[in-house]
Amino acid sequence: MRKFLVVLDDSRECLNAMRFAALRAAHTGGGVTILSVVPPEEFQTWMGVADLMRAEARERIEAHFEVFAKWMRDKQGVNPDLVIREGDPVNEILNLVNDDPEIGILVLGAGSDKSGPGPLVTALSRTSGSLPIPITIVPGDLSKERLESIT
């Protein structure tokens, strides 16, 4: 089964990427893998409480994931997988793509403000020619209705 990989983070544009991945998976009989990457620098300041901070980060990610997963299951009939990794987001995306041969498309949400499309879109666009899968970049300002009509 072909899976759509989408990144769960705190960005606003993440929502459109999630919607797009779920809608495309539902229409094509595919699956969705949701990746959340925790940067290791979050834990380096307080080494004595690093395990507690990791546990709290995991709980926050799982709660956030459940909101998206419930919508995907209830509205689209798609049961997403969650992968949580620690490290550099770009490296962890590439590692997961290489680790899971069922991942066929990376879906990223692009920011729409003056600061640009976002660090993931910028970094992965630079290396897109050497990626083993295509990238779909979903505009952050795309309306829900327009998103539904094009998927």
Image (cartoon, helix red, strand yellow):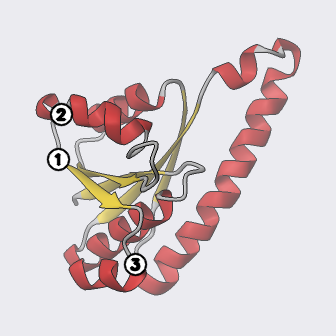
Q: Which residue is mark 1?
A: 134
Q: Residue furthest left?
A: 129
| Residue located 59% across and 59% down the image | 65
Q: Which residue is mark 3?
A: 143
Q: Is residue 137 left or right of residue 115?
A: left
- Mark before the other along the chain sequence, 3 or 1: 1
| Residue located 35% across and 29% down the image | 95
| Residue located 38% across and 46% down the image | 117
Q: Who is closer to the viewer here, 91 or 119?
A: 119
- Separation (CA) of disc 2 from disc 1: 7 Å
Q: Is residue 8 left or right of residue 99?
A: right
Name the amino acid, label 2: Leu
Look at the picture and state if 20 lies above or below 120: below
- Separation (CA) of disc 3 from disc 2: 29 Å
Q: Which residue is mark 2?
A: 131
Name the amino acid, label 3: Ser
- Neighbor class of circle 3 (other Cα within 10 Å; few <14, some 14-19, many 20+) is few
Give SS at disc 2: loop
Q: Position of residue 1 (x, y in %)?
A: 22, 60
Q: Position of residue 133 (x, y in %)?
A: 17, 43
Name the amino acid, label 1: Pro
Q: Nearer the viewer, mark 3 or mark 1?
A: 3
Look at the picture and state if 9 lies above or below 124: below
Q: Is residue 23 left or right of residue 151?
A: right
| Mark seen at residue 79 | none
Quadrant where the C terminus sits is bottom left
- Neighbor class of circle 2 (other Cα within 10 Å; few <14, some 14-19, many 20+) is some
- Mark before the other along the chain sequence, 3 or 2: 2
- Separation (CA) of disc 3 from disc 1: 23 Å
